[in-house]
Image: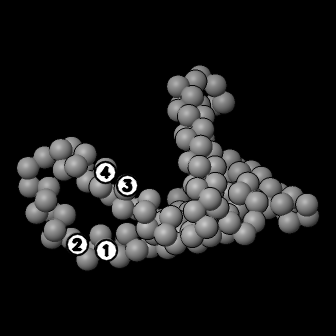
């Protein structure tokens, strides 16, 4: 075990996740810039993602999945609109400011998740969360100052 309760496998998976996020962030930022139309880029990416992901979900969930998805189409539509708006705002911002800065600010959503976890879900807010929150805030300050 490394870092207390974290195993080497968990750290490797987290590192792989970081690499994927960095990769798609750079690709999307450059794609939105190259397209000269962030809204069109977002619509195209959502359509392509949906077309590729839907068959996988249908196979994964098996028979009856189409009925289950259709029964909840309103929730799916609202959720999809929210994801598209969030993604679109981030990509638009990447056409106006440095991609790295926008990406760093976007990842501060972890702070909101932490607040929700502590206040709404009543999760423990121990030393590790205080340290992590402080590091995120220090990073924001560094971005602001420089």
* Distance between mark 3 and mark 4 Cα atoms: 6 Å
Please give the residue where the numbered disc 2 appears in the rendered image. 73
Q: Is residue 112 above or below residue 51?
A: below
- Could you say whether the residue bearing mark 2 is in a helix, strand or loop? helix
Q: Residues within 10 Å of mark 3 (few under 14, many from 20)?
A: few
Whether the residues at callouts 4 and 1 have beta carbons within 8 Å, the answer is no
Q: Residue furthest left?
A: 63
Report the mark closest to the observer, 4 or 2: 4
Residue 134 sits in quarter: bottom right
Q: Using the image, tell me which numbered label, if any, was put on residue 77.
A: 1
Q: Residues within 10 Å of mark 2 (few under 14, many from 20)?
A: few
- Could you say whether the residue bearing mark 4 is in a helix, strand or loop? helix
Report the mark closest to the observer, 2 or 3: 3
Q: Residues within 10 Å of mark 1 (few under 14, many from 20)?
A: few
Please give the residue where the numbered disc 4 appears in the rendered image. 53
Whether the residues at callouts 4 and 2 have beta carbons within 8 Å, the answer is no
Please give the residue where the numbered disc 3 appears in the rendered image. 49
Mark 2 or 3 closer to N-term? Answer: 3
Identity of the residue drawn at 37% across and 71% down: 79
Q: Position of residue 12 (x, y in %)?
A: 57, 28
């Amino acid at each position: 075990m490394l870092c207390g309760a974290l195993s080497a496998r968990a750290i490797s998976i987290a590192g792989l996740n970081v690499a994927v996020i960095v990769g798609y962030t750079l690709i999307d930022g450059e794609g939105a810039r190259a397209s000269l139309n962030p809204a069109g880029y977002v619509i195209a990416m959502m359509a392509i993602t949906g077309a590729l992901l839907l068959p996988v979900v249908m196979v994964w969930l098996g028979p009856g999945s189409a009925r289950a998805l259709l029964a909840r189409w309103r929730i799916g539509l609202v959720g999809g609109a929210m994801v598209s708006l969030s993604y679109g705002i981030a990509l638009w911002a990447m056409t106006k400011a440095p991609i790295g800065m926008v990406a760093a600010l976007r990842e501060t959503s972890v702070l909101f998740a932490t607040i929700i976890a502590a206040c709404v879900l009543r999760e423990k807010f121990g030393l590790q969360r205080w340290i992590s929150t402080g590091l995120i805030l220090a990073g924001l300050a560094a971005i602001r100052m420089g």
